[in-house]
Image (cartoon, rainbow, N blue to C red):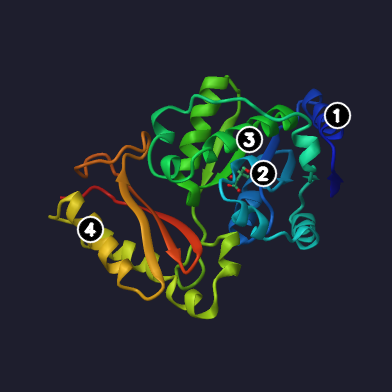
Amino acid sequence: MEIIKTVGQLKERVATQRVAGRTVGLVPTMGALHDGHMSLVERARRENDFVVVSIFVNPTQFNNAADLATYPRTEDADCNRLSRAGVDVAFIPGVEDMYPEPDNRQFDLGEVAAVMEGPMRPGHFNGVAQVVSKLFMFAQPTRAYFGEKDFQQIAVIRRMVETEGFDIEIVDCPIKRADDGLALSSRNVRLTAAQRAVAPMIHKIMAESVANATGKSVSQVRKEVVDSINAVPEMKVEYYEIVHPLTMQPVDDWSDGPVGCITVYCGDVRLIDNIKYTQQA
Ligand code: PAF
């Protein structure tokens, strides 16, 4: 595996592949790789001739300086995993490579960015659009892979692809969970042992709410989930919204197969998860 640190080198390396008619799969990450990331990498490996994985902790998408400062960084271990997975290029730029000038672009992300993470993390999605659009320009991928744990982020990226006119297939990949149900996340390492022990309750309660939703209203199910999770020690729900799977707008009936999107503070660690509600009677 080649480790590339500069934009110029990446562009050259990828251009050779595209000229030769080879497909390029891109997996954008912020490092601290876990099995969830690796499932994206494995899929990209299966579906493309050439695979680029970027590792870049993007400062413009953090609206909280402490979160940026404490974001886990495990570059050597990440590179070992990527190399073993048969990745062709790990692209690991510095902030000065990605942002030689301040990026003042404001993206029109529409209604999908106006709810949930949008108001909770002002500027976050614009920062994601800034970095992902740059990665798309530099890596020129045929396909790009994103995890469904960040369900709203995928909708925002699809919107950005549409408005910016990128000819790139966005591939969404299912959430990977630990055996006890906790969605894998780079932030899980920051949980104390006591918090880690209760964190799987998030998925357990959401899964039970899907199983028991028949005959109940959306607002009743939503309230039950919030109350049950708030009753767990150390847990505080920031929001739980049951939304249309494409528009991200809250729904008031089950007809479109909505998705429940949650963020929960477990101590001071902000955990995110979601679940699909299949058609309810
Ligand atoms: O999901 C992430 O890890 C990040 O938001 C992404 C897509 C790599 C952009 O920095």
In the image, the residue with mark 2 has its CB under 8 Å from the nearest atom of ligand 1: yes
Q: Are marks 2 and 3 in contact (CB under 8 Å)?
A: no
- Tell which circle, 2 or 3, labels the residue nearer the N-terminal end: 2
Q: CA distance from mark 3 to mark 1?
A: 19 Å
Q: Are marks 1 and 2 in contact (CB under 8 Å)?
A: no
Residue 60, picture quadrant: top right
Tell me which amino acid carries mark 4: Lys
Work out whether 163 lies above or below 245: above
Q: Nearer the viewer, mark 4 or mark 3?
A: 4
- Res. 113 in view: yes
Which residue is at a point 43% across and 75% down the rendered structure image? 198
Tell me which amino acid carries mark 2: Asn
Which residue is at a point 37% across and 64% down the rendered structure image? 236
Badge 4 marks a residue whose secondary structure is helix
Residue 151, picture quadrant: top left
Q: CA distance from mark 4 to mark 2?
A: 35 Å
Check disc 1 and report the residue beneath it. Answer: 12
Few, some or many C-alpha atoms within 10 Å of disc 4 (few <14, some 14-19, many ≥20)?
A: few
Which residue is at a point 74% across and 56% down the rendered structure image? 85
- Tell which circle, 1 or 4, labels the residue nearer the N-terminal end: 1
Work out whether 108 lies above or below 35: above
Tell me which amino acid carries mark 1: Glu
